[in-house]
Image: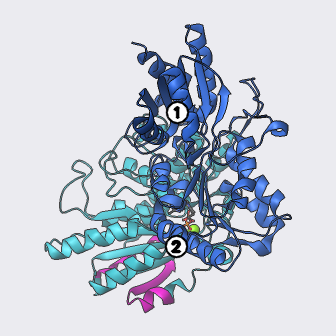
Chain colours: A blue, B cyan
Amino acid sequence: MGNMILADKNSKRVATRAAYGNALANLGEKYSFFVLDADLSGSTQTAIFGEKYPERFINCGIAEQNMISIAAGIAAAGTPAFASSFAMFACGRAFEQIRNSVAYPELNVKICASHAGVTVGEDGATHQFCEDIALMRSVPQMTVINPADATEAYAAVEAILNHDGPVYMRLGRFAVPVIFDKENYSFELGKGIVLADGSDVAIFATGIMNAAALEARDLLTAEGIDAAVINIHTIKPIDKEIIVKYAEKTGRIVTAEEHTVIGGLGSAVAEVTSELCPTRMARVGIEDCFGTSGKAAELLDYFNLNAAGIAAKVKALFR
Amino acid sequence: MEREKLLCLDEAAAGIRCLSLDAVYNAESGHPGGSLSIAEILAYLYFEKMNIDPKNPQKPDRDRMVLSKGHACPALYSVLAMRGFFPETEIPTFRHLGSRLQGHPVMYKIPGVDMSTGSLGQGISAACGMAIKAKRCKEDYKVFAIIGDGESQEGQVWEAAMFAAHYKLDNLIVFLDYNHLQIDGDVRSVMNPTPLDEKFAAFSWYVQVIDGHSIKEIDYAVNNAYKSDKPSVIICNTVKGKGVSFMENNHTWHGKAPKKDDYEKAAAELKAAYEKAREARING
Ligand SMILES: Cc1ncc(C[n+]2csc(CCOP(=O)(O)OP(=O)(O)O)c2C)c(N)n1
Ligand SMILES: [Mg+2]
């Protein structure tokens, strides 16, 4: 695979929502699709598309449940529709509409939800949705994507457009390091990406935790632990093959996600290994609690969603 | 209402504006526009109308207030601090890690907050729940709620409206902050919710339309509402960002904090208005 990693940890930082907004605007010419929003088009960045293609942009107002079913209607009438809001409202509030109006009829609705996780920051717990992956993963027919950086998010937009069926894609507010080189990156739905090989432990990371996992790897190398880092951008369908391969190779697994440890990546990986190759593992994530107000970077440290947090869980597996 | 009281409440509203701005500035985030538009409503409720006791914030027979448009909590926290529910010195901790003054209101954690809100459309339903509880348990507290005009695009608002009329919740008084703006622009261009008065009337509510920056009109409307046998909505014509010239009627100040220069300009305007209100009160 030609996915080249920008090793520089101090590379520029871009929010995945920004890549999403630009991708929509740039794909508008090549593809026919609608974009819907619910009074957050500046935040979700769908406004960029809206300005360029007003006739294919629909602001639904603050009415997320309605927006999801409208998107379903547009898709049912033959044109794919993207629907965006904060994850809390696009996925949380409209869960049942997603299940019954989008997933059950297998419609081409792409729910691209921004401001997921604790990195929403100061808005606090009511807006910090750490349960979306668990919810979306549980719905039949749903594909669930959580891009690691802006490059991956950008590429994923075209990939999900070419995928026939409902998709949930998680995006963030916070500017995070760009890991992938745009020129050499290709997105393959359902395929994990080995960011760094290793033989002692496999760290499976998703979303913005990939950058932290790479940093953790450096910390561990200094302590004589050789860690592999694998990016799981598609949480459903999950890449069983790569999980089993690395479980067997290293015998130890740590998962890392900006999401509750219940039902997310950690659970998805555990489901695979417990059936196919039982492996010792630990999960890094939100430990079954609500978020709190604070700056995004502070909150990542507060909840141990950082390199030190991952390294500590890894080391515990060696005790 | 006597002139003396009116002047006191005008001064309180001006004070709420000053503190709200400070809260948002210190947090480097938050929602100034929709906080500044509800200062008079909050001053009236907390300093005049509501049966509340800052020393006993949980007293069972208290009147309740649900800030359904929870993002405007800088104004709520300000009035609660001014009323003595917690020290004003806590205001600068708003939205900071470890502070109880969360980005959106949290009940129990913050004395005087009757309901956790932040997700639009839900607070009005919770207020209906409080109101029907009073009815069924034969308690006679009142329930107030403040909702946004953008918020009224949520279907849940109308589910609550139907519920309140169906169960004749005449102990429920909803203020609709009609400041004409939401995040993406003018409510009428994003998703027109008007005519709001006719919609609520069609749902069998008692509807009044007033100047939401006039304590006198707020008082008049609430007293009328107390006499009605229907749930009440008071549609308050307001100015988003009221009191800060460059924030007024400007949707870009919905959810962002001013930087130092803008803060100083805004604070000067709000302090001047506060001093003026204070002098007016002192001079009668
Ligand atoms: C369910 C839900 N959807 C979206 C948001 C994000 N949001 C916060 S404030 C706001 C606009 C509110 O407009 P309005 O009700 O008019 O409030 P005001 O003008 O009084 O500030 C939006 C969309 C939210 N908090 N809850
Ligand atoms: Mg408004």
- Tag 1's secondary structure? helix
Q: Which residue is mark 2?
A: A101
Q: The residue under label 2 is which amino acid type? A: Ser
Question: Is any part of residue B213 visible from this angle?
Answer: no
Residue that sits furthest to the left in the current view: B138
Q: Which mark is residue A244?
A: 1
Name the N-terminal-most of marks 2 and 1: 2
Residue A157 location, x and y as percent? 72, 54
Bounds of the magenta span? B198-226
Asked which secondary structure carries label 2, the reply is helix
Residue at mark 1: chain: A
Q: Position of residue B75 (x, y in %)?
A: 47, 55
- Residue at figure coordinates x 83%, y 57% from the top left: A26
Q: Which mark is residue B188?
A: none
Q: CA distance from mark 2 to mark 1?
A: 35 Å
Q: In the shown orientation, is residue A192 left or right of residue A287?
A: right
Say whether residue B32 is magenta: no
Give the quadrant of residue B243.
bottom right
The chain under label 2 reads A
Q: Nearer the viewer, mark 2 or mark 1?
A: 1
Q: Quadrant of the C terminus of chain A?
A: top left
As shown in the figure, which amino acid type bears the numbered disc 1? Val
Q: Using the image, determine if residue A276 lies above or below residue A75.
A: above
